Image (cartoon, rainbow, N blue to C red):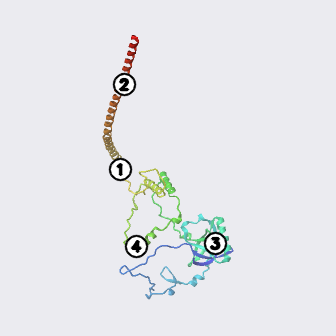
């Protein structure tokens, strides 16, 4: 990576030669301005207001505009002669806990690279000292013609520096908070906590710029001559009164569904995102009357269906019962006949034997 600034870290009496490297890069898609009539590119030219002639970069200098419009020229030599100790030095002024740095002050990020072999030992010393102390270093440095505030911390095995805004550059949030007093119920807080727990943590490396990808696809489609269909506008629900409890409940269900978590609830919590609708007040009596009438209609319809379905079944049962009774009667008659015949035969045999005995 190409360095953008060379200097040294001033750590007490220790001086650490370093190179400053950008730690971030901008992936935004940049557009050019064109003339809609013919597609020609629009360019800006630097023109002097006095003679209305275009001026080249080498002929342009700096000036401060006074309150009355007077231009006070300032040269690079003037700025170089200022007593600025941080012109080529990142001067550490204090070591503080990281939570004392207001995130609102965070600006650009840089990596600090040891410049040369002799710088490796003091660089490593400062890095390990920052690790062991669990603190960050607050420093001053000069970059692009102005003195800035910075914070040094350890990222892996590298010392990183975040540019910080000066405290007086942070605006007070006056008039930003809601004007009216709002009361939040415990039930709403509980649902908000449940939603936070359901969403859980995220792998920061998995996040990406969906809008930039969509713009790249749009450019590719137009370059290949394809027709681009406009996206349907979504309902943001701005300016509407919302049912906060329902929105939170549906948001929890949607978050669970997106994470593949099983939830036994059905019906209202169907895993869809909460729609924002105005709250409508309805009459309790009318709704109760309608619901009871609907219930009566449903009950009568169900009773008719049940009767019509059960009638043929009961007829079939009667037929089977009568058939069973007839079969049982036939079996009884046959059994009785057999018994009678068997008993009659036995009596005849006994009579014959007694007659033979008498004749003898």
Left or right: residue 169 versus residue 299 is: right
Q: Quadrant of residue 36?
A: bottom left
Q: Are marks 1 and 2 in contact (CB under 8 Å)?
A: no
> Where is residue 117 drawn, in percent x and y?
67, 77
Q: Is residue 224 above or below residue 103?
A: below
Residue 221 bears which disc, if any?
Answer: 4
> Where is residue 219 drawn, in percent x and y?
42, 74
Which callout, 3 or 2, points at the residue further toward the start of the chain?
3
The label nearer to you, 4 versus 1, is 4
Which callout, 4 or 3, points at the residue further toward the start of the chain?
3
The label nearer to you, 3 versus 2, is 2
Q: Is residue 106 above or below residue 38?
A: above
Which callout, 1 or 3, points at the residue further toward the start of the chain?
3
Q: Secondary structure at mark 4?
A: helix
Residue 338 bears which disc, if any?
Answer: 2
Q: Quadrant of residue 23?
A: bottom right
In-front residue for pair 343/292? 343
Q: Residues within 10 Å of mark 2 (few under 14, many from 20)?
A: few
Which callout, 1 or 2, points at the residue further toward the start of the chain?
1
> Where is residue 95 drawn, in percent x and y?
64, 67
Q: Quadrant of the N terminus?
A: bottom right
- The answer for how far apart the CA atoms under marks 1 and 2 are is 83 Å
């Amino acid at each position: 990576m190409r360095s953008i600034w060379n200097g040294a870290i001033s750590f007490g009496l220790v001086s650490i030669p370093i190179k400053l490297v950008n730690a971030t890069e901008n992936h935004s898609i940049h557009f050019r301005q064109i003339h809609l009539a013919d597609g020609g590119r629009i360019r800006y030219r630097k023109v002097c207001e006095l003679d209305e002639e275009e001026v080249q970069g080498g002929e342009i200098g700096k000036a401060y505009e006074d309150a009355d419009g007077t231009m006070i020229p300032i040269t690079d030599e003037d700025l170089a002669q200022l007593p600025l100790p941080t012109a080529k030095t990142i001067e550490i002024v204090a070591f503080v806990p990281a939570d004392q740095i207001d995130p609102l002050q965070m600006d650009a990020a840089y990596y600090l690279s040891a410049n040369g072999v002799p710088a490796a030992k003091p660089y490593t010393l400062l890095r390990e000292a920052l690790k062991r102390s669990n603190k960050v270093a607050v420093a001053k440095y000069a970059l692009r013609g102005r003195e800035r505030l910075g914070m040094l911390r350890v990222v892996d095995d590298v010392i990183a520096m975040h540019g910080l805004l000066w405290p007086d550059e942070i605006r007070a949030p006056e008039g930003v908070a809601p004007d009216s007093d709002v009361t939040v119920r415990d039930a709403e807080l509980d649902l908000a906590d449940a939603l936070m727990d359901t969403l859980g943590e995220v792998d920061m490396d998995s996040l990406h710029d969906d809008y930039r990808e969509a713009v790249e696809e749009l450019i590719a489609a137009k370059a290949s001559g394809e027709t681009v269909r406009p996206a349907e506008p979504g309902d943001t629900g701005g300016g509407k009164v919302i049912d906060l409890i329902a929105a939170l409940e549906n948001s929890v269900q949607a978050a669970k569904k997106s994470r593949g978590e099983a939830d036994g609830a059905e019906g209202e919590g169907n895993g869809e995102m909460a729609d924002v609708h105005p709250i409508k007040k309805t009459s309790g009596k009318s709704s109760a009357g309608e619901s009871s009438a609907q219930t009566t209609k449903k009950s009568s319809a169900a009773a008719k269906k049940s009767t019509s379905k059960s009638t043929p079944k009961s007829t079939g049962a009667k037929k089977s019962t009568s058939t069973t009774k007839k079969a049982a009667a036939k079996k009884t008659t046959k059994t009785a006949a057999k018994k009678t015949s068997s008993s009659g035969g036995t009596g005849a045999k006994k009579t014959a034997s007694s007659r033979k005995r008498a004749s003898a």
